[in-house]
Image (cartoon, helix red, strand yellow):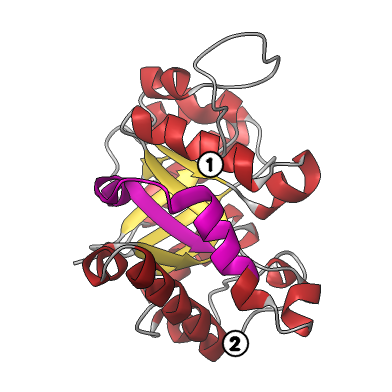
Amino acid sequence: MRSKIVAGNWKMNKNLAETDALLAELSAKLPDTTAEVMVAPTFVNLTGALSTLESSTIQVIAQNMHFAENGAYTGEISADMLLNIGINTVIIGHSERRAYFGETDEILAKKVKAALAKNMRVMFCFGEELQDRKSDNHFNIVESQLRNALFDLEASAWKNIILAYEPVWAIGTGETASPEQAQEMHAFIRKTITDAFDVTIANEVSILYGGSVKPNNAVEIFSKPDVDGGLIGGASLIADDFMAIVKAI
């Protein structure tokens, strides 16, 4: 049975004191749930977050990593560095990394392989832009992003893959794909994986929705059969909102 997951991507927000305060509040308000609950603070606050959440079931994950093990990559972080402090899950391919930092499918494929080689879990993000949806090319874009980064993996690698579908046009815009649109795409993703691998892998991989999930729409989105949770942005920075989304799962 695939995992239900709610993950908060904090992006470039919260200093150390603010991080500690929010994590303490989240831990205190965490409802009884069988879902996996994750937070991704900034790199400089990962160690502190692990310490603050030492007695909590909330997992700390990373927002990004480099594909190289070490070397002359100023400002970058390797898989081994993350593992060494106790981080074993990493977000790869977020739309902002693609848009602002030029991360191509080729780069992301190398990152995925580097993380999996270290037995890390990968939360792989993908999704179409507004022009792709308007031109009715969204299914082709999503299939291409999945194929280019993930479809040459061994079948056994999929046990460490979490997928996060991000309709880019619904991130930070206040727009949200309707629950029906989310379900349509998630079902398409599962069929695409079935065709490339098999139905067992497709049915076991968790597929999260990552487009402006809020307390007022989470229940309806999460009720769809192929939506296994959410990758949450802005709402994850407000304890009551994030916990309401966790309750919705």
Q: Which residues are magenta?
A: 141-165
Dot 1 crowding, Cα within 10 Å, few <14, some 14–19, many 20+: many
Name the kind of residue labelled 1 in the image. Ala
Q: CA distance from mark 1 to mark 2?
A: 30 Å
Q: Position of residue 64 (x, y in %)?
A: 57, 36
Q: Quadrant of residue 138?
A: bottom right
Secondary structure under the numbered disc 2 in the rendered image: loop
Give the residue drawn at x 43%, y 72%: 192
Disc number placed over residue 24 in the picture, else none: none
Q: Quadrant of residue 232?
A: bottom right
Identity of the residue furthest to the left in this view: 1
Q: Image quarter for residue 238? A: bottom right
Q: Which residue appears at 72% of the width and 79% of the height?
A: 133
Check disc 2 and give the amino acid type. Ser
Q: Position of residue 179 (x, y in %)?
A: 53, 87
Q: Is any part of residue 227 visible from this angle?
A: no
The quarter of the picture where the C terminus appears is bottom left
Q: Position of residue 39 (x, y in %)?
A: 47, 46
Nearer to me, 116 or 74: 116
65 in relation to 165, above or below = above
Q: Nearer the viewer, residue 40 or 242?
A: 40
Q: Read off the residue under disc 2.
A: 178
Precedes in sequence: disc 1 or disc 2: 1
Residue 209: in magenta span:
no
Along the horizontal axis of the image, is 116 left or right of 133? left
Residue shown at the point (31%, 68%) measured from the top left: 202
The residue identified by callout 1 is 109
Image quadrant where one finds the N terminus: bottom left
Q: Residue at x 43, y 54 (%)?
A: 151
Which secondary structure dominates the residues rendered in magenta? helix
Along the line of sight, which residue is nearer the eye, 122 or 39? 122
Q: Is residue 166 left or right of residue 60?
A: right
